[in-house]
Amino acid sequence: MKAFVPGPTYHEMLHPETLPQAIRARAAAARGNELDPANLFNITWRDSAGNIRYVELPKALTGVDANILVLAGRWFPSGSHKVGPAYSTLVEGELAGEIEPGVSTIIGPSTGNFGIGTAYVSRLKGYSAVVIMPEQMSAERYQRIRQYGGQLDLTPGSESDVILVLERTEQYKKDAKNKILAQFELLPNYRFHRYVTGRSALEAAARHGNGRVAAFVAAPGSAGTLAAGDEIKARFPESVVCALEPKECSTLFNAGRGTHRIEGIGDKMVTLIHNVLTTDYVALIHDEDCVVGLDLLERRRPGVERLLGLQERALDTLGGLFGVSGICNIIGAIRMARFLHLGPDDNVITVATDGYDRYPSVLDNLAQRKGPATADHFEAMFRALDPAEILDVRPREQKERLFDAKEEVWRDFGYSHAYLESMKSQSFWDSEYDKTDGIDGALVQSR
Ligand SMILES: Cc1ncc(COP(=O)(O)O)c(C=O)c1O
């Protein structure tokens, strides 16, 4: 059997400063060559100085008193934090003896970023990879996957047609050498985000306001990122977790199932790894607001600066940091701050999964469809609040509705009623999380 190409533990992704000095030096040098396998050790929210990569949005932009902090995922190797779940799922498969170098082919069902992460991690760890994804995602996504040597298998439709991706994935299971990194189903995605993202978010918040987290806001695709909310709640039980959805595909909100333009989120289902127990609110965001919002922050910043009475180039530090779903999360974070009447001591945390580099083609398409956006749209998009578009899902009957919606999807993919029932208890999630240390120990042993 070929040896595993080594990579970090969960703990080392959270604290890369604990890696042996020689590995840290190799990882630092590897930043200049993205195909150097030492980049696996750069899968972390931290920069080379050890700081969590996030921005605090200017209050002039948000119009709210609360501090809105956005973790920036674009600095991860391959350009989005989705490489973390892809890496963690592959490594847990290796440790379980299910994935073998030289034997297995890695299959990544995705809408893009997880597929990019899968192709990238597979390349670094010496596996071939097939990414199954819809055919109408941004051109930049396919280009990256090919650049990393991943093969593409495209299914009809766009973001909200992920069920077709899952159905195609079933066909790959017939060949035992194909190993599926099933991001919607497997718990390494949960563990990565609860441990690495959740604790990184807590560390960022500690430097602002009262040091606590009043709200964590994220738009689920696989719902991996939302698991950070579980860790935040474990530390600050009063904090509120809000899941965002495109208004055009309001599946959690009211079983809506339409097509939409926010790549990476709104996949027409309750994913298996979504711990609906800890989701307190579901809020709807209009998809086109996120695309136009990105256009304003990327291509029309001077107009926005003028409108907000800011100095020229005051918003330049935000350039490149967000993709369309990042704008969705920012709009959602601002709305939740307003909805919850949060003040200057309160912190709202959200995430930008990827950066602008994946979306020039999407903004070119916007320009073709609509002509140039103007900064006049700013107020309506970033500042509006319609409480009818925020649903409180804390009541028991809402949880039951979401459990049922989950069962409806996952029964068809072979999950037993008993397993789905076990997920209705927080102890299921906590015990999955508690496996993290043991997995880290096994990984250290295998290196
Ligand atoms: C651009 C983008 N935003 C948001 C998400 C949602 O993240 P998660 O799958 O962790 O819920 C994804 C997932 O692929 C994504 O690619």
Image (cartoon, rainbow, N blue to C red):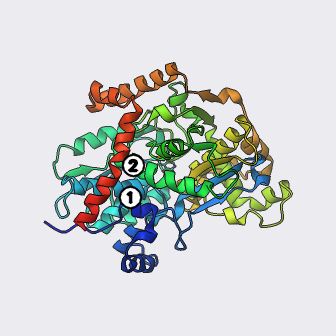
Res 142 quadrant in image: bottom left
Determine the residue positioned at 61% across, 49% down.
349
Label 2 vs label 1: CA separation?
A: 8 Å
* Residue 271: % across, % down: 41, 36
Quadrant holding the C terminus: bottom left
In the rendered structure, find residue 10 and report the number of the disc placed on it. 1
Residue 112 in sight: no
Closer to the N terminus: mark 2 or mark 1? 1
Give the label on residue 151, or none: none
The kind of residue tagged 2 is: Arg
10 Å neighbourhood of mark 1: few (<14), some, or many (≥20)? many
Task: Look at 29% across and 54% down and name the residue there.
Answer: 439
Taking the spot 42% from the left edge, 26% from the top edge, the residue there is 403
- Inspect the image, locate mark 1, and give the three-letter code of the amino acid beneath it: Tyr
**Left of 300 or right of it: where is 430?**
left
Query: Is 173 displayed left or right of 25 in the figure?
Result: left
Residue 191, numbered label: 2
Determine the residue positioned at 55% across, 53% down: 201
Task: Give above or below for 251 relative to 202.
Answer: above
Q: Quadrant of residue 400?
A: top left
**Quadrant (top left, top right, bottom left, bottom right) of the N terminus:** bottom left
Depth check, front residue: 84 or 105: 84
Q: Residue 267 location, x and y as percent?
A: 46, 38
